[in-house]
Image: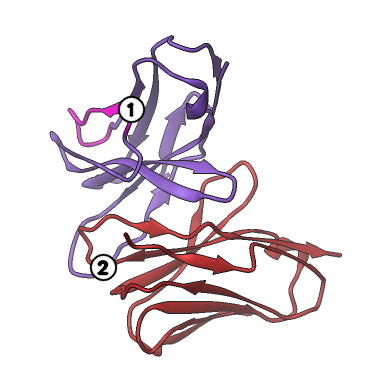
Chain colours: A purple, B red
Amino acid sequence: EAQVTQNPRYLITVTGKKLTVTCSQNMNHEYMSWYRQDPGLGLRQIYYSMNVEVTDKGDVPEGYKVSRKEKRNFPLILESPSPNQTSLYFCASRLVRGTYYNEQFFGPGTRLTVL
Amino acid sequence: TQLLEQSPQFLSIQEGENLTVYCNSSSVFSSLQWYRQEPGEGPVLLVTVVTGGEVKKLKRLTFQFGDARKDSSLHITAAQPGDTGLYLCAGAQTSYDKVIFGPGTSLSVIP
């Protein structure tokens, strides 16, 4: 089954404790992205990657890191989480081709609480 | 900064009613998409519109892309409880561009 998986689905942590949220896709998509979703603000892009070893900042990259060492994986790293990073996080992937925007496939989300 | 606005923010209607939600921007997009998100899940694509003035129908859902490619609407006929969810519009200028999401319209259809 074609899908994007994220782990963990739920995480409660404390300020300053490094954490990683994993994301994996099995559709051979070049493009992968991380979003955070907050009430009234919609989905805001954190980082995206056009392909292996190519990453770029989205709209809200502060406090986050990413890496793209393999095509299928795109982990999100919070080196020193703070309470304002409490949010619902989504990983997504899509093909890159042509001039039209292709469908993004989203993971099930990771609900993060930073105390 | 590109922004997408959606209205209304919340909508609660009775089963069988019709409704329209709107997505507006001051920027021109080459394509605009509508996603639906159900609680506890990620957004799922409903439709992509790419031509100014384009109208697409998906069963009881009708999507329209404005002539100037700055706005879009989603009309639902005879809403059902299964239509309940968060409706998000998303725009992009090229396939390689960042995607801009609107804040969403939360729809509740009461049986």
Give the residues in magenta.
Answer: A62-73
The residue that disc 1 covers is A64
Q: Amino acid at mark 1?
A: Tyr
- Predominant secondary structure, magenta span: loop
For mark 1, does the 10 Å Cα neighbourhood hold few (<14), some (14 to 19), or many (20 or more) residues? some
Q: Is residue A72 magenta?
A: yes
> Relative to A111, does residue B68 appear above or below in the rendering?
below
Identify which residue is drawn at 32% across, 59% down: B1
Give residue A29's position: percent from left, percent from top. 25, 47
Identify which residue is drawn at 40% across, 50% down: A105
Report the chain holding disc 1.
Answer: A
Label for residue A9? none
Seen from the viewer's position, the closer of residues A56 and B58 is A56
Q: Quadrant of residue A12?
A: top right
Q: Is residue A33 magenta?
A: no
For numbered disc 1, what is the local secondary structure? loop
> Relative to B21, does residue A17 appear above or below in the rendering?
above
Label for residue B93? 2
